[in-house]
Image (cartoon, rainbow, N blue to C red):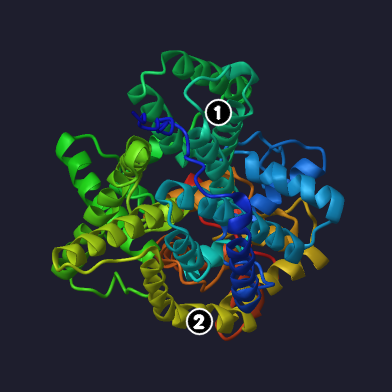
Amino acid sequence: MATKPTVRKAAETQLPVTLPWKSDLIYLIILSVVFLLSYSYIFDKKMDLNGDNFGYMNYAKAILDGKGYVTPYSPDFPATNWFPPGYSFMLALLMFFFGNNIVLLNIVNGGLYLGAILLLFIFTRRITNNRPLAFSIAALLFLNSGLMRYATILMSEIPYLFLSTVAIYCLLKMPDEVKLWKSKLFWGVVLGSVGAFYFRSVALGLVGGILLYMLFQKKWKRVGAYVLSFSVLYLPWMIRDHMHGLKSRYLDTMTVANAWRPEEGHINTLSGFLDKMAVNFNDTVIKGFTEVLFPFVKVEETAAPTMLFIGLIVLIITFFGAWKTGKFRVFFGGYLLANIGVFLLWHSGNGSRYVWPLAPFIAICFFIGLYELVKWVLGRFKVKTVPAFAFSILLIGFLMLPKMKELNEMAKQDYPPAYKNYFQIAEAVKANGSPKMMVCCRKAEMFHYYSGTFVNTYVFSLDDRKVIEHMVNTKVDFVVLEQLGYSSTGRYLYPAIMKHPDLFQPVMQLQNPDTYLLAFNKEGAKKFLEGTSAPAIQQ
């Protein structure tokens, strides 16, 4: 009697290697071509105007100059932890070898994005056993205008995405039985997640997802080894911050009512926290998940009830897709939930900004869920589907092209006039002033990048006396009155200048729009604060 052949099941915690690597080669080549075409089409040689990228460059230059990770905006160069240090150190290393080449630095980010998505393609097809589906998801990510924009600017989102992808790939590929301390996959998880945490604090969600996955597997030794390894590698940074008396700004950020309106104070009631979490859920999950999947959807212009309906559908399909990843459902579901938890605790007003590094994983879960849902519906009507049916998802790419065209047009344009004036004044200060001057302005990191002077930002206060007192205390020499479009200038700085014109003398003016460099009368300001009349600035 013939015996029934034994079928060995794939390990419950290991990516099933069911498809040979060589069979993926054609897909990897096509995806690389799609990326190169998209990237070259929207590539922008200019510095992005978000501001944080200028900060990363300024910190990197301070590191390169041998000052360490410090704030280069103050005469005493104090130690800083404003951003996690990873990206600035990466930029400093690249600048050491290749110089201050913005184009090359942007291209490095693009290369990291390409690597991350190709790696995501590999483990998506292993999870689904469906190459067309994995290919279609990856191709759409190369047509996603939001993610592609981040791949062309000097921001930490893409290096963070790359490191988190490496960590997740190693985690899902790790077999049940492994000698942890000798396992390359285990150290890939540790180094990838620690590295991600050094780039972005939102990696707390990544760490939470990894731990949750290990706990559900009941791999207690693995949990202990991971916690120990992570702690040892992150401890030096914590010790450094403690030695300099630095505290995480993110803890305070979580309790602030409005990060851009400090006069509104902090949240100190349970109802206040619940209200903030409801706002953040709407902004980052309902709107955010939808926007990062479909950048062509105008989430801010869509009626609130309609947007809520769309967002909930997206969320349901995304978690359904996470469930359909089978033995990996705990990780994907836990990773999404951990990140949502971080989003809810963060301060409000960020929209989808912090969701973008999570976007590829949202896309994987959403499109797996959508594919399985459509397949189930068609099955109810006795319609059989084949894996190649997943290529139909690529039709969404046509809806993404207009946003890509907008990026192409933006890349060809010069800076807006307000920023050109702002940068021109900074360059004039660099050419004619002293690097030891203190300039008070909005977007101080931008002004420092072009001027090299010390800088600070005016205090956000409706009390003109506090605004002027802050300038005196920080020894301000000049003030820049600009029209970059930030409400804080008109709300805090402009009223103080208009109320005390004798303290601010124009020394440079550019038109269209009007932008001023004003000499600050420090002695007059001191007299004002003391309650006596202020002497006029000498002409």
Q: Quadrant of residue 451?
A: bottom right
Quarter in which the N terminus is drawn: top left
Report whether residue 440 is seen: no
Give x and y (percent) for residue 415: 62, 78
Name the quadrant of the C terminus: bottom right
Image x and y of residue 394, in percent: 42, 73
Picture disc at residue 406: 2
**Which residue is painted at 20% across and 49% down in the image?**
278
Tell me the amino acid under the disc marked 1. Leu
Give how far across and how far down residue 492 sits, in percent.
Answer: 42, 60
Q: Residue furthest front?
A: 1
Pinpoint residue 93: horizontal percent, then vertical percent: 78, 45
The residue nearer to you, when weighing 128 against 234, is 128
Disc 2 on helix, strand or loop? Answer: helix
Cα separation, mark 1 vs mark 2, equals 42 Å
Q: Give the label, 1 or 2, closer to the camera.
A: 2
487 up-or-down from 420: above or below: above
